Amino acid sequence: MKLLIGADHRGREPAERLTERLRQQGHAVECHIPGAGETSDYPDAAWAVAHAIAEKEADLAILLCGTGIGTSIAANKVHGVRAAVVHDEITAELSRAHNNANVICLSADLLGQRLIEKIVDRWLVTEFEGGRHDRRLRKIEMIERGDDPTQESR
């Protein structure tokens, strides 16, 4: 699977460790991570990763910042991106199964490396359930177009 990983300076170290682990598992991983000692703004990594996902240059993406919130807000501004802040394996699974999230956003400050890895592992193996969730994704697409989602027929 082709994955993207992006991080600001607060997410750099866990992102580097996660990148190495995912490559060892056989994934192709492209990184948008600042160098050691560099400061960076989370919207920069979020934009690079979200834009690449929207252009279908990779399958899925992972963003790390202090809380995961900033990268989620920034990534979700890109049309076609469904970025979810997740903080455990359950929210990771549901973000894929119910919301078909193509980006997860993680807190580098609040989650340890082992939990980050468990979250990513669960997220990568979870498939979108479809069914009743398809209608909900269509409504999200309507919102992106500026349309009223309540007008979507069942």
Image (cartoon, rainbow, N blue to C red):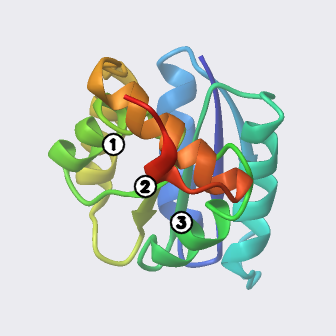
Give residue 86's position: percent from left, percent from top: 32, 57
For the C terminus, give its image quadrant.
top left
Query: In the rendered image, which quarter is residue 61 located in?
Result: top right
Check contact, mark 2 vs mark 1: CB within 8 A.
yes
Secondary structure under badge 2?
strand
Which one is nearer the viewer's eye here, 38 or 29? 29
For the N terminus, give its image quadrant.
top right
Check contact, mark 2 vs mark 3: CB within 8 A.
yes
110 relative to 67 in the view: left or right: left
Label number found at residue 84: 2
Label number found at residue 95: 1
Q: Which residue is mark 3?
A: 72
Q: Amino acid at mark 2?
A: Ala
* Figure disc tally: 3
User: Quick one: label 3 or label 1, which is nearer the N terminus?
Assistant: 3
As drawn, 114 above or below 153: below
48 relative to 90 in the view: left or right: right
